[in-house]
Amino acid sequence: MAKRGTDVDLRIKRTQKAIKSAFFELLDEKSFEHISVKDITDRALISRNTFYLHYADKYELLNKVCDELIIKLFFRISKQLRRVQREEFTVESIAGILRLGLMVVEENHEAYRILLCSSGIDMLSQKLNAMSRRFMDFIKDDIEGISDISIEYIVSGITGVIKYYVNNGVDNLDEECYNFTKIHLSSIVEIARETRSKKE
């Protein structure tokens, strides 16, 4: 009985993998608005009925694909961010979080590249912005006087860095992350340290 359940789970995973692979291939060829469910099923070599067993439509497929990427990124970074909160805000520690984030992105490089750069969709960008704002909510109590416009600058910058990275890569990830943090976020780091010092 357990074997039968395992076989079903594997079939589901294989089918979903085929659907996603077909979807990404099509997104790399044409805009989202010009992709139909039939295009996806033809490319994945499955029936339309099989597709609808897994997704209501192409919009749900897009949403779930984006959510999977964001959830993975969120949990990996949030663990590191909590560690920094317990210890100390430094340029090095914040650069380490940025580096970790880009390493997680690299694990799904093509998915990020296609979803961030394909014509007609900005769902992943929106979800990245929302995730970054949530991270800022984690630490804004440690940053006395930070304004909404400063938060928006940081949020937009992070999404922009990810877009640049998946399109162009970097020669030295450690150095680039450190330099970015030092140039753009060092004042935030200093305010965080001062705020924490006052609370202590």
Image (spheres, grey):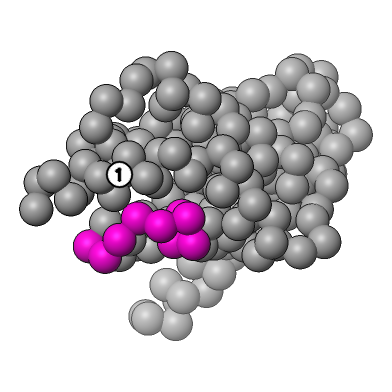
Query: Residue 84 in the image: x percent, y percent?
Result: 33, 61
Look at the picture and state if 97 lies above or below 194.
below
Q: Residue at x 76, y 47 (%)?
A: 166
66 to the left or right of 3: right
Q: Residue at x 79, y 56 (%)?
A: 170
**Magenta residue span:** 86-94
104 to the left or right of 110: left
- Would residue 12 be visible to someone looking at this image? no
Q: Quadrant of residue 10?
A: bottom right
Q: Residue at x 42, y 72 (%)?
A: 5
23 to the left or right of 123: right
Q: Which residue is tagged 1?
A: 192
Q: Residue at x 52, y 25 (%)?
A: 153
Which image quarter holds the N terminus?
bottom left
Front residue of 166/138: it is 138
Look at the picture and state if 136 lies above or below 86.
above
Front residue of 118/79: it is 79
User: Within the magenta stretch, is there residue 58?
Assistant: no
Query: Residue 4 in the image: x percent, y percent?
Result: 45, 76
Q: Residue furthest right?
A: 29
Helix, strand or loop for disc 1: helix
User: Within the magenta stretch, is there residue 93?
Assistant: yes
